[in-house]
Amino acid sequence: MSRETDGVDEAIAGELRLMDPSVRMSKSLARQLLDPEFVEVGASGRRWTYEEMLQALPEMDGASEDGPRYEPSEMTGVMLAPGLVHVTYETVIGGERARRSSLWRKREAGAGWQMYYHQATPVPPEAM
């Protein structure tokens, strides 16, 4: 496997971990996966910062073991530059569909990949 493929695979694995209820419930696990400069523009249009997301994540959809879970599909990634991966995919949770895009970065050798930016765009039923 090439270093480029490894980076894409690691970013996708991180993306999937962030959908895991046990990670969403744990600030320490989520902190490992979110870059300190993280920003998200959610499907609601709200802009989230790193600290806001860490506080809210345990209460958000997908955080309960017995509640609705994110169902990702069509997940793909591309290395944009050394240490920067773009991941795109779609999710369904509770009947709501969204197209998602994330930037993952690795700041230094030996460090893990972290989500730097995330954008979710709702897909209206008529567009399905």
Image: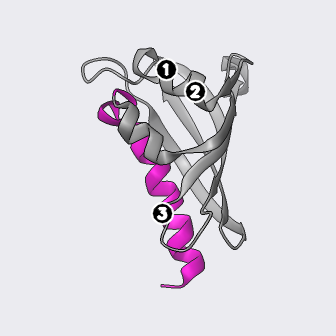
Tell me which numbered mark, 3 or 2, is placed earlier along the sequence: 3
Quadrant for residue 64, please give it. Answer: top left
Q: Residue at x 42, y 14 (%)?
A: 59
User: What's under tag 1, amino acid-wise?
Assistant: Gln
Residue 113 in the image: state x and y as whole percent: 53, 59
Residue 15 in the image: state x and y as whole percent: 50, 47
Q: Residue at x 29, y 33 (%)?
A: 22
Give the residues drawn in magenta, as a range: 1-25
Task: Give the residue at mark 2.
Answer: 51
Disc ID at residue 10? 3
Residues at discs 1 and 2 in contact (Cβ within 8 Å): yes
* Gap between marks 1 and 3 measured at Cα: 25 Å
Residue 69 lies in the magenta stretch = no
User: What's under tag 3, amino acid-wise?
Assistant: Glu
Quadrant for residue 13, please give it. Answer: bottom left
Judging depth in this view, the residue of 75 and 42 nearest the camera is 42
Residue 18 lies in the magenta stretch = yes
Residue 102 in the image: state x and y as whole percent: 65, 46
Task: Give the residue at mark 1.
Answer: 55
